[in-house]
Amino acid sequence: MDQAPLSSSRAWSWIPSLYFTQGLPNVAVAALSVALYKSLGVSNPQIAFYTSWLYLPWVVKPLWSPVVELLGRKRHWIVATQFLMGAVFAAVALTIPGPAFFQATLALFWLLAFSSATHDIAADGFYLLALPEHQRAAFVGVRSTFFRFAMIAGQGGLVFGVGRLIKEGWAATQAWSWAFAGLAVFFVLVAVLHQFVLPRPSGDAPAKRGGALVADGLAVFGAFFRKPGIGTALAFMLLYRLGEAQLVKLIQPFLLDSREKGGLGLSLDQVGWYYGTIGTGALLAGGLLGGWVVSRWGLKRLLWPMVCAIHVPNLAYVYLAVVRPDSFAAVGGAIAIEQFGYGFGFTAYMLYLMLFAEGENKTAHYAICTGFMALGMMLPGMASGWLQEQLGYVWFFGWVCLATIPSFAVTALIKVDDHFGRRRAG
């Protein structure tokens, strides 16, 4: 039997910190690594290719999601992986100033990605267990917002801090080492916090033990691929973010590259300022608004506005690449538009994954969904650096806009009822 519904105030005590913590290692692997390598002289094609490979642990995490589903309590998995990620961040901090930093940090980022993917499985499953259905819809905007807030804190606050230290005369390697050391301390502290504040839902218990694990794991996979509409659903998971998968790998290189190379020629602290202030506010507004409107009017009614919101703002980067403005308002406004649209539109994607994962073994099935989501980010991202180098920034961002067309096509094929939302027809 499921636990009694938690109060909204109790949910606020752990959902923001849990998903902020979930977002930080993701941003470290997928985005902060880009800024690190760009500032230390690694080329765009190398950055895009190797950092896209770091998505692989999220792609294959469904292979071990049944272990988290069937062994141990998800609450314990969450705390243990947070301690582990703190240790990995500390190792990255020690490795950056050393020889062969590129290979060494890539290996550590792989371990961080594996730990983070395991944490994601446990955290998302815990969210589904700890909240009743109507609260899941109401808080999906909160969790998405704090996940993205962590990404902005990494791309914004940490990058800004590193940039300021470099301007004050610190070596880039030293500044980055201190940033990752700070992340290590934070993860140890948050692991201790979650040991006390996470609720203890009755449904959070080991499901199976012993020899039945493998057979039950295969059964979980089989049940997922027998779900009705699986082909269309997989196409949606893989193609919804096709344009964004290429865009995100080149945003920071574009902002940091000199104007002679077609970029905006910003410093690290300027990039951090834009994302850490304007971007944060716009993202929070978009994510919270997305969760609120869906909880009131349902996903079916809001699906197309959200699809447009996540894709149309990509035109802002075409504008920046063509005009290359140097005014704070123009650059900040373009970033704000893109971040607001992303925060609003990504809500629909995450809700659809939750909806498709509903049923028995929903923790493992949701992990499989997010694995396909990661694959949809990894494959296009791998070639994006090479493609940008061939096309230049203007035509590359134009291509990104064209790459959103498959997303609109697969959205037209999926079926969404009013499963989410308080107001329902009939």
Image (cartoon, rainbow, N blue to C red):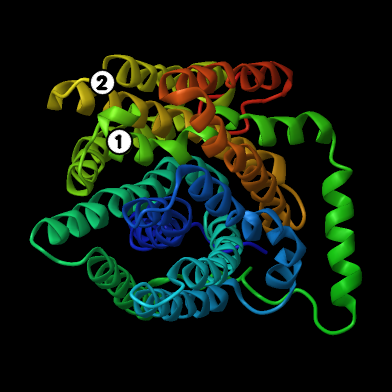
Vertical side of 50 occupied by 377: above or below: above
Q: Quadrant of residue 338?
A: top left
> How many labels, in total?
2
Image coordinates of residue 293 in percent, x first then y, are 42, 27
| Residue farthest along the left direction in this orientation | 168
The amino acid type of the residue labelled 2 equals Arg
Q: Residues within 10 Å of mark 2 (few under 14, many from 20)?
A: some
Q: Which mark is residue 255?
A: 1
Assign the N terminus to one quadrant of the image.
bottom right
Spatial distance from mark 2 to mark 1, Cα to Cα?
10 Å
In the figure, is residue 295 to the left or right of 365? left
Vertical side of 169 occupied by 371: above or below: above
Vertical side of 190 occupied by 411: above or below: above
Residue at (59%, 53%) from the top-left corner? Answer: 55
* Residue 310 visible here: no
Residue at (68%, 16%) from the top-left corner? Answer: 409
| Residue farthest along the bottom direction in this orientation | 210
Residue at (49%, 35%) from the top-left corner? Answer: 347
Report which residue position mark 2 lands on.
324
Is 228 or 240 nearer to us in this picture?
Answer: 240
Q: Which mark is residue 328?
A: none
| First reached walking from the N terminus: tag 2 or tag 1 | 1
In the figure, is residue 102 to the left or right of 192? right
* Residue 111 visible here: yes
Circle 2 sits in a helix, a strand or a loop, which is it? Answer: loop
Image coordinates of residue 183 in percent, x first then y, are 32, 70
